[in-house]
Image: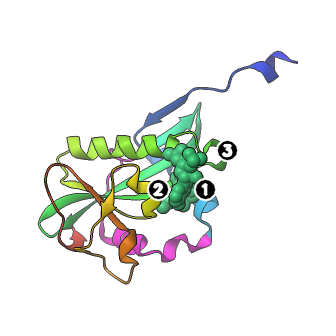
Amino acid sequence: MSAEASAPPPALTYRSERPKDGPAVEALLDRAFGPGRFVKISERVREFADFASELTVCALRGERLVGVCRIWRVRVGDERVAFLGPLAVDPDERSAGVGAEMVARASAAAEAAGEAGVLLVGDEPYFRKLGFAIAPKVRMPGPVDPRRVLTRTFGDLSLEGAVRPR
Ligand SMILES: CC(C)(COP(=O)(O)OP(=O)(O)OC[C@H]1O[C@@H](n2cnc3c(N)ncnc32)[C@H](O)[C@@H]1OP(=O)(O)O)[C@@H](O)C(=O)NCCC(=O)NCCS
């Protein structure tokens, strides 16, 4: 075996998103979601939300982007809330906890920044394990399966009302 073949892979690191990550993030999201990704209800929210690059978490294997968990600033009712998504991990890196780690880091960053909670539209079986629960009183800006509207709040708070711009 050559020295190159036996070299360990570069370490996995996490950091916030930088402007130069844009093309790699778009390529990762295209691979993970395909062309239908822009018709999702979450995309309607992102049209009016403020992108929070400093709360967004990127996972890198060496220099290569292998995961992203984007965060946006919105309001729900009167509360300032972090809207999470898209979340995607490179197929070669899945089922190793990268997705869970990015959600945990983004949530911690949102809490430290004073957000009241994290909101997302996604698969409950996955996000329940990460501390999220169905948010029956949050109104999205269009039709959505209510079982996919999930929140995790910081402190004893139940989010209620329409999702709207900050
Ligand atoms: C969803 C995703 C981000 C998870 O990334 P990951 O790094 O593999 O996640 P974790 O390692 O934290 O968790 C993996 C576990 O979650 C499970 N899982 C993945 N997607 C799931 C889903 N939609 N519903 C339920 N469970 C799911 C996996 O089967 C795996 O289970 P295992 O540990 O028993 O093998 C990744 O699969 C992905 O990029 N998918 C395509 C994009 C997507 O659908 N994103 C939005 C999710 S709502």
Gap between marks 3 and 2 measured at Cα: 19 Å
Reading the image, the residue beneath label 1 is 27
| Image quadrant containing the N terminus | top right
Q: Is residue 4 left or right of residue 118?
A: right
Spatial CA span between label 1 and label 3: 15 Å
Amino acid type shown at disc 3: Asp
Tell me the residue at 86%/18% (across/down): 2
Secondary structure state at the residue bearing disc 3: helix
* Label 2 environment density (alpha carbons within 10 Å; few <14, some 14–19, many ≥20): few
Q: Which residue is mark 3?
A: 92
Could you tell me which residue is drawn at 50 percent across and 31 percent down? Answer: 13
Rendered view: 118 above or below 139: above
Question: Residues in magenta?
Answer: 35-56
Q: Residue most toward the bottom?
A: 143
- Decide if ligand 1 comes within 8 Å of the CB at mark 1: no
Q: State whether residue 24 appears in this view.
A: no
Q: Secondary structure at mark 1?
A: helix
Q: Position of residue 105 (x, y in %)?
A: 36, 40
**What residue is shown with label 2?**
126
Q: Which of marks 2 and 1 precedes in the sequence?
A: 1
User: Alpha carbon of mark 1 to alpha carbon of mark 2: how far?
Assistant: 23 Å
Q: Position of residue 24 (x, y in %)?
A: 57, 49
First in sequence, mark 1 or 3: give its number.
1
The answer to whether mark 2 is within 8 Å of ligand 1 is: yes
Dividing the picture into quarters, in which one does residue 147 lie?
A: bottom left
Task: Between residue 58 and residue 88, name the one nearer to us.
Answer: 88
Three-letter amino acid code of the residue under disc 2? Tyr
Q: Residue at x 17, y 47 (%)?
A: 114
What's under tag 1, amino acid-wise?
Answer: Ala
